[in-house]
Amino acid sequence: MSFADLMAFQRDTEALGHIAGRLGWDQETMMPRGAAGHRAEEAGALEGVLHARRTDLRVGEWLAAAVPADEVQAAHLRHIRRDYTRHSKVPARLAQELARLTSLSQGIWAEARARGEVAHFLPTLQQIVALKREEAAALADGTNAGLYDSLLDDYEPGATAEWIGGVFGRMRPRLVALRERVLGAAAPEPLKGEFPAEQQMRIARDLATAFGYDWTRGRLDLAVHPFSSGSGNDVRITTRVSETDPFNCFYSTIHEVGHAAYEQNIDQSFLFTPLGRGVSMGVHESQSRSYENQLGRSRGFTGWLFGRMQAEGFALNLPDADSFYRAVNRVQPGFIRTEADEVHYNLHIMMRFDLERAMIAGDLQAADLEAAWNDRFMADFGVAVDKPANGMLQDVHWSVGLFGYFPTYSLGNLYAGCLVKALRADLPGLDGDLARGDATAATGWMRERLQRFGGLREPRQTVAHACGFEPDEAPLLDYLDAKFSELYRL
Ligand code: ZN
């Protein structure tokens, strides 16, 4: 009976968690400005209910007594046990302090960023790092060894800093070499012009459809930062529009469809269970990045998009599909991670990974972060940071306590490299399909081989199962070398 009781209890916890997510979606898209305080009260009350359920002593008793009958039940128990253990290890006082501080600190970070004043954010950052170190120590059971790993575990169960550090160490020289060759070659012409929002959104909706977004169980709205929200039969996405840069809207949309399709395509029998959501941030990102980059920025698909933009009546400064493909994939060093091209992106992540690991280890103090950031940026990118908004204040993550999150973006790229390698081997007609704007075979492959399983397997095993081989960095690096050597005629 224990297993059935546990799953019934968990089902309501999952549903309440979905409601908390829906409140967040509403806040970012529809909520009137004056309702922020009202919403904070609602979200806080719901968070209290959720925390009480996640640490409910009956969960511990059910877990101790439950005997799994099969692989699916064992996976359910694994997820619930991990969650219960995690929430029970962190003292309620610390959890509350962190929640309170990180809800305030986002505003302080935004102010500091707007004013260009690092000093305005430093005392807060110092407190956040102190609390995260305390949390990490509680999670690591008092040992000092695995502080960063225990934070990483929240986003990418099973991954360790040692493994990621090794992967990054092997990736860096090849990425740097490729970047040098690309920047030494002639830069392609960028897309220029004015692109009205309404027409961009028409194309964005076509893109979402092309990549398999199920409109009967989702919707598309505008938000400052694009995101996907929800799971199961209510998965909503957002995008943004810049009238001078339609690629921002188009590729944000495809990216979020990758996240959303993962959630929408999970086996319906996993609804309202721990298996009914994407298994980790890295695997999630592997979906959004393979949709956006490997498929969406391919020669075939950009050819279709070029035609679609012409059909929309846009006056394009680029004469043909080839120059359009080159404009979409233009490589340019820049300060901002979220705007980085495929060649530069992972270098941004490696830098954040090293800096945040040093902060959590206690080797780098908040007061020294700006200098460390700027030195490292000069060494890695050859450019001096001109203002904090282009440097250490550019990302929201640390201000809301997300330490250990950044490397999952690069793991997503690494996994995407593996998945698309396997997918291409199975689908020899892929480029022809994409050139017709048809991604059905590719998205169907992802659904059958990975998405439908939800949280059944651990993250790395999820990818290995889909690919048929153990994931590593080689397929991603081979893909980048081949793509950009051809594109830049190196
Ligand atoms: Zn993403």
Image: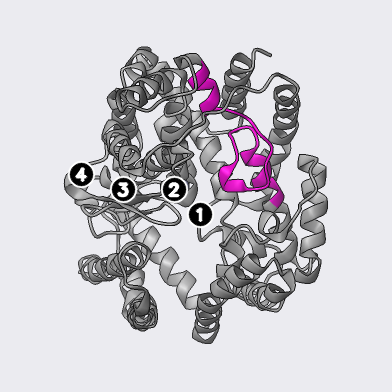
Q: Is residue 264 above or below residue 293?
A: below
Mark nearest the camera among 2 and 4 is 4
Image coordinates for residue 52, horizontal then vertical, percent: 36, 81
Residue position for label 3: 263
Q: Mark 2 near mark 1, Cβ–Cβ under 8 Å?
A: yes
Residue 111 is drawn in which quadrant?
bottom right
- Which stretch did the figure color magenta? 323-351
**Marks 1 and 4, how far apart at CA:** 31 Å
**Viewer-nearest residue: 164 or 109:** 109
Residue position for label 1: 157
Q: Secondary structure at mark 2?
A: loop
**Marks 2 and 4, how far apart at CA:** 29 Å
N-term-proximal mark, 1 vs 3: 1
Mark nearest the camera among 1 and 4 is 4
> Which amino acid does the dot numbered 1 rest on?
Pro
Residue position for label 4: 215
Is residue 346 located in the magenta-colored stretch of the structure? yes
Is residue 356 located in the magenta-colored stretch of the structure? no
Q: Is residue 146 visible?
A: yes
